[in-house]
Image: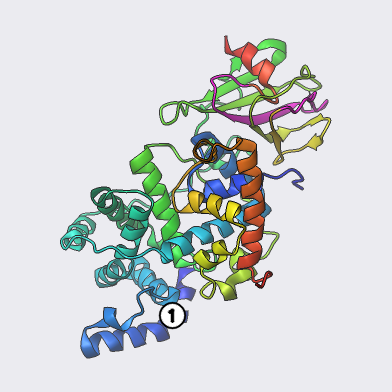
């Protein structure tokens, strides 16, 4: 049961289409797992539909329809294919598509300090201020307490972690804002696999920030 | 799934065809903002029969409005025409993915237009929920349509936004009518990012209540 959800304004910006690629990635992953937030997104998309419906029509070029009819004449429809997620059963398809292939989830991830593994998802080509990183933290690993200079979002995919705000299971999102100070500890049995996204400066500063930056080199 | 929709809309289809055959002026008979049922029928014809006449009719009904919407959000005439073509090609290719039980036609068109806009104008990646993801959690709540479905046609979004406190209405308009991210809004209004987020959070909750018909002024 998911207890920690995304904020409404984040869901709205995803629906309206003006959040960054990394936020889009974490929203899409979370709403795969969370029907409550998925329903909220569909309401915000309905608002977008209403905005479209109430826009004043503008005449289209006289030849646009003919161009389209020509195009669909020669269009070979691509069937909607389901990207089957065979290997990593806890990873939503939208996220899975951005990870390297391998026999185990973290096979090709980089090794960091203290047994932590990580993989950077490349979103820089489309937006250099949008960062996304997968993290695998060993069981019982305690991270140094630290603060935040900007918002960072963390989605738990496997295992979980605890901090002063409570416990986070698979599907839960931790939202760390400016000035939060906390001490996350990965679960003692399974550890924790999570997606962390951050916008703005080049450095990760939040939840696992100190560790993320050590890993950066 | 779609066959059901099709059977349910047959009576509308026969009416529509009767009008078409009788006077060949079907477009002037329909209201400017075409009703969802009529559009659903046309999309159904495209999905089931790759019906080009239905496609042409749909284009004439929704094309000018989509173009108007894109221009309202800041696209030039030329860019809006390009995006509109891509939107209509997607409608042609993906018509079978439209599920009336999940979204209104306007919502579906909005999401396609949103994605094409991000694709073509911002050239950004937009990771999105895969509706076929086997990990998709079961819906535990009523679908968005059931929540305020009966008000879907009746409540105008522009009027609902006007009922918000001015400082909130401005932020919602910037999100949906000007396609601005939280950080751009914060810059433009010279407001702390946290304030922008918390105000949009308040506004989104109130807007949902207005649309659900829970607030009467």
Q: Which is more toward the observer, A126 or A91?
A: A126
| Span colored in magenta | A179-204
Colouring of the image:
rainbow
Q: Which is more toward the observer, A165 or B73?
A: B73
Which residue appears at 39% of the width and 53% of the height?
Answer: B113
Question: Majority secondary structure of the magenta segment?
Answer: loop
- The furthest residue to the top: A217
Q: Which residue is mark 1?
A: B9
Q: Is residue B38 left or right of residue A195?
A: left
Quadrant holding the C terminus of chain A: top right
Q: Which is more toward the observer, A25 or A193?
A: A25
Q: How many numbered callouts?
A: 1
Residue A60, placed above or below residue B129? below
Q: Is residue A24 visible?
A: yes
Residue A3, placed above or below residue A98? below
**Does residue B118 belong to the magenta stretch?**
no
Residue A3, placed above or below residue A106? below
Q: Which element carries disc 1, helix, strand or loop?
A: loop
Q: Is residue B134 visible?
A: no
Residue B112, placed above or below residue B30? above
**Does residue A192 belong to the magenta stretch?**
yes
Which chain does the residue under circle 1 lie in?
B
Which residue appears at 24% of the width and 58% of the height?
Answer: A72
Residue B150 on image: x %, y %:
58, 76
Residue A128 on image: x %, y %:
46, 26
Q: Is residue A45 left or right of residue A158?
A: left
Residue A12 on image: x %, y %:
57, 50
Residue A186 found in image quarter: top right
Residue B162 found in image quarter: bottom right
């Amino acid at each position: 049961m998911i207890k920690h959800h995304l904020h409404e304004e984040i869901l709205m910006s995803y629906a309206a289409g003006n959040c960054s690629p990394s936020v889009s990635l974490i929203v899409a992953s979370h709403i795969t797992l969370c029907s409550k937030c998925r329903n909220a997104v569909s309401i915000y998309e309905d608002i977008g539909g209403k905005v479209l419906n109430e826009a004043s029509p503008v005449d289209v070029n006289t030849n646009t329809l003919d161009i389209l009819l020509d195009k669909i004449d020669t269009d070979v429809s691509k069937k909607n294919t389901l990207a089957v997620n065979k290997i990593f059963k806890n990873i939503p398809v939208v996220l899975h598509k951005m990870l390297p292939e391998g026999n185990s989830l973290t096979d090709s991830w980089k090794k960091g300090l203290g047994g932590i593994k990580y993989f950077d998802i490349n979103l820089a080509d489309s937006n250099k201020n949008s960062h996304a990183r997968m993290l695998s933290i060993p069981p019982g690993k305690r991270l140094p307490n630290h603060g935040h200079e900007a918002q960072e979002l963390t989605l738990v995919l496997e295992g979980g972690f605890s901090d002063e705000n409570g416990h986070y299971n698979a599907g839960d999102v931790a939202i760390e804002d400016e000035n939060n100070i906390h001490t996350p500890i990965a679960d003692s049995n399974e550890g924790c696999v999570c997606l962390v996204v951050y916008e703005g400066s080049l450095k990760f500063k939040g939840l696992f920030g100190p560790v993320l930056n050590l890993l950066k080199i | 799934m779609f066959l059901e929709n099709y059977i349910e809309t047959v009576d509308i289809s026969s009416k529509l065809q009767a009008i078409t055959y009788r006077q060949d002026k079907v477009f002037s008979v329909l209201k400017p903002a075409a009703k969802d049922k009529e559009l659903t029928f046309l999309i159904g014809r495209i999905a089931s029969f790759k019906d080009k006449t239905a496609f042409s009719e749909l284009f004439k009904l929704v094309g000018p409005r989509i173009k108007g919407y894109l221009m309202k959000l800041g696209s030039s005439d030329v860019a809006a025409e390009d995006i509109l073509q891509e939107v209509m090609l997607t409608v042609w290719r993906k018509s079978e993915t439209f599920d009336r039980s999940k979204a209104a036609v306007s919502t579906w068109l909005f999401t396609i237009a949103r994605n094409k806009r991000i694709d073509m104008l911002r050239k950004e990646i937009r990771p999105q929920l895969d509706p076929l993801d086997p990990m998709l959690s079961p819906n535990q709540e009523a679908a968005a349509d059931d929540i305020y479905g009966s008000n879907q046609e009746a409540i105008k979004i522009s009027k609902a936004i006007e009922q918000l406190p001015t400082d909130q209405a401005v932020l919602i308009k910037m999100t949906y009518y000007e396609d601005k991210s939280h950080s751009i809004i914060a810059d433009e209004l010279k407001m702390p990012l946290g304030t922008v987020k918390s105000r949009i959070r308040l506004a989104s909750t109130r807007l949902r209540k207005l649309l659900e018909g829970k607030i009467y002024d």
